[in-house]
Image (cartoon, helix red, strand yellow):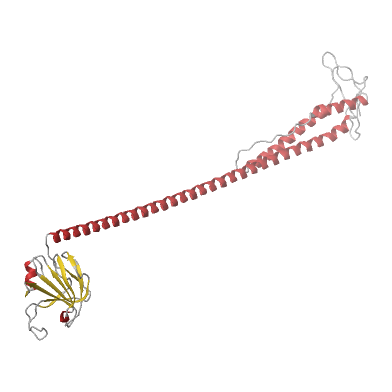
Amino acid sequence: MASNSPAPEGIDVQEQPTAGAWGEWNPTEDSARPPRGKHRVLKQRGGLARSSTVLGVGVIAAVGAGGIATAQDRPQVAISLPSLPPLPDLPEALGGADRSAGDSDGGSTRTAEPARSGIIPQQADRRSDAGELLRSRILQQAESQQEAAAAQERAEVERVAQEAAAQQARDAQAAKEAAEKAAAEAAEKAAAEEARQAQEAKEAAEAKAKAESAARSAGAFFLPTSAYTLTSHYGDSGSMWSSGHHTGLDFAAPTGTPVKAVGGGKIISAGWSGAYGYRIVLELPDGTEIWYCHLSSMSVTGGSVAGGDTIGRVGATGNVTGPHLHLEVRQGGVTVDPLSWLTARGLNV
């Protein structure tokens, strides 16, 4: 039951509903006295809208805190916050709605209650969606940054591998070039050594030729052949010789072995000579005759020759039992011992 006792001055008193009967008390000019002094009761405008704003900010803070807590469970990476569109000024919008509603019913706050009860959930949902969007964007940003870090790490690994492969290729190329250089140097050295040996051989041959030429000019003497075996000496007796004894010195050697002039002189006879076969007669400057018998061929048949020149080849022509050179030395038409004659001229037969 409502009390009709007057309220104290300066206080806006509302009648409380009785138990079991709920109603609404609307003050009038008679039931509400104007306040005294400076304490006046102003008509509230948009109070519920301001309360909605506070509630929305709380929801955003709660949702944001949940999103940040979830993000903290993930690996720590550097992130950047995305830019969000500006939110409308809710108190102003709601305040305008309250004012328009109050003006329509002569200043009564009763008509604003349904509008306020509908705006608060809508604003809370809108703030909640904004918080979820912020959390989703933060997570996406973190994932994208993790992927970028992983891609950068893979790129670094590939770069290191490529540098290692390039270094190996450079090392292989350097080793190849070093081997080629060493082979070229070895080939050049071998060629130089071969050229040196050839030059030395040439110089030795030239020196030998000069020595032989000098010896010939000085009247040196030479053995009539090489690689031989003495088979019969001067004065040997037997039925093989028509005179009963051997008139020369036999040098057994393979057919075709070169026969040389024992000294410088001239060829005075060359041709077939019965039991002597093919024969060359060399006359020395002192008149001594050197007979070369049983030749297989004759290289020189006339003219002057130098000591050591090849004048024929060993053979088995005439009255022989095998290939050999029969050498006779005649002075004044009389035969002498060829072995003694050659030895007297410094030859080691």
115 to 233, vertically: above or below = above
Most extreme residue toward the bottom, as rendered?
Answer: 239
- Left/right placement of residue 265 relative to residue 59 reads left
Q: Which of 106/25 is in front?
A: 106
Image quarter hosting the N terminus: top right
> In the image, what residue occupies the spot 78% across and 37% down?
126
Image quarter hosting the C terminus: bottom left
Residue 46 at x, y = what percent? 83, 26
Residue 128 at x, y = what percent? 75, 38
- Left/right placement of residue 116 relative to residue 69 reads right
Residue 182 at x, y = what percent? 36, 53
> In the image, what residue occupies the spot 12% across and 71% down?
290
Residue 179 at x, y = what percent? 39, 54
Q: Quadrant of residue 260?
A: bottom left
- Left/right placement of residue 116 relative to residue 198 reads right
Most extreme residue toward the top, as rendered?
Answer: 37
Q: Quadrant of residue 141?
A: top right
